[in-house]
């Protein structure tokens, strides 16, 4: 199972990709949103490693990770923002969030680049990072 430090290193790598794509946000809003979600995933997994969440302190499946975030009072603030990142990444990758949800021809019809910058990067991802840093009591989570 990857360690806290391994997950934070992956989060930093994702941030470098976000920085690169942010300069081309008009071209890659969906990929930027997807990478932002995966950065949040690694921040959450680093927190789980510190907390020992989900029994082993590591989850391999979105379903399990989402359940732990959703049902653990300690993680409610993270879940509120992580859920938005997860749903947005599903739409970016599959052009719908679930089999009953609306379909989109292209991601930018769901969320234009300026909204990716404001909501995905400027709010949801930032809040996941801040909440994880607070819960872990470590500045290293603000990657």
Image (cartoon, rainbow, N blue to C red):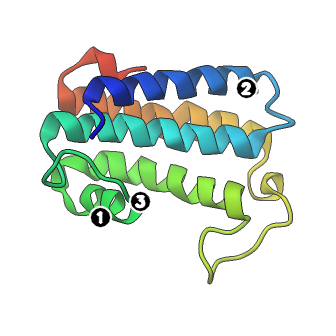
Badge 1: how crowded within 10 Å, few (<14), some, or many (20+)?
few
**Residue 63, x across and y down, in percent:** 38, 65
Frontmost of labels 3 and 2 is: 3
Sequence-wise, the earlier of marks 1 and 2 is 2
Give the label on residue 62, or none: 3
Q: Quadrant of the N terminus?
A: top left
**Residue 87, x across and y down, in percent:** 56, 59
Sequence-wise, the earlier of marks 3 and 2 is 2
Numbered circles on residues, count: 3
Residue wearing tag 1: 67
**Residue 139, x across and y down, in percent:** 28, 16
Residue wearing tag 2: 22
**Residue 11, x across and y down, in percent:** 46, 28
Badge 3: how crowded within 10 Å, few (<14), some, or many (20+)?
few
Circle 3 — which element? helix
Per the model, the C-alpha gap separating discs 3 and 2 is 26 Å
6 lies above or below 106: above
Residue visible at 70% across and 64% down in the picture:
94
Residue farthest to the front, as pictured = 1
Seen in the image, is 134 located left or right of residue 118? left
Which residue is more in the foreground, 57 or 128? Answer: 57
Q: Quadrant of residue 41?
A: top left
Per the model, the C-alpha gap separating discs 1 and 2 is 31 Å
């Amino acid at each position: 199972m990857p360690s806290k430090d391994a997950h934070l290193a992956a989060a930093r790598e994702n941030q470098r990709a976000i920085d690169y794509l942010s300069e081309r946000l008009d071209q890659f809003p969906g990929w930027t949103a997807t990478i932002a979600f995966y950065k949040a995933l690694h921040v959450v997994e680093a927190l789980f490693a510190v907390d020992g969440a989900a029994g082993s302190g590591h989850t391999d499946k979105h379903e399990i990770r989402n359940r732990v975030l959703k049902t653990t009072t300690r993680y409610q603030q993270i879940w509120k923002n992580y859920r938005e990142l997860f749903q947005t990444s599903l739409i970016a990758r599959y052009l719908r969030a679930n089999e009953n949800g609306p379909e989109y021809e292209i991601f930018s019809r769901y969320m234009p680049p300026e909204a990716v910058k404001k909501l995905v990067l400027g709010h949801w991802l930032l809040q996941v990072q801040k909440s994880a840093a607070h819960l872990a009591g470590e500045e290293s989570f603000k990657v």
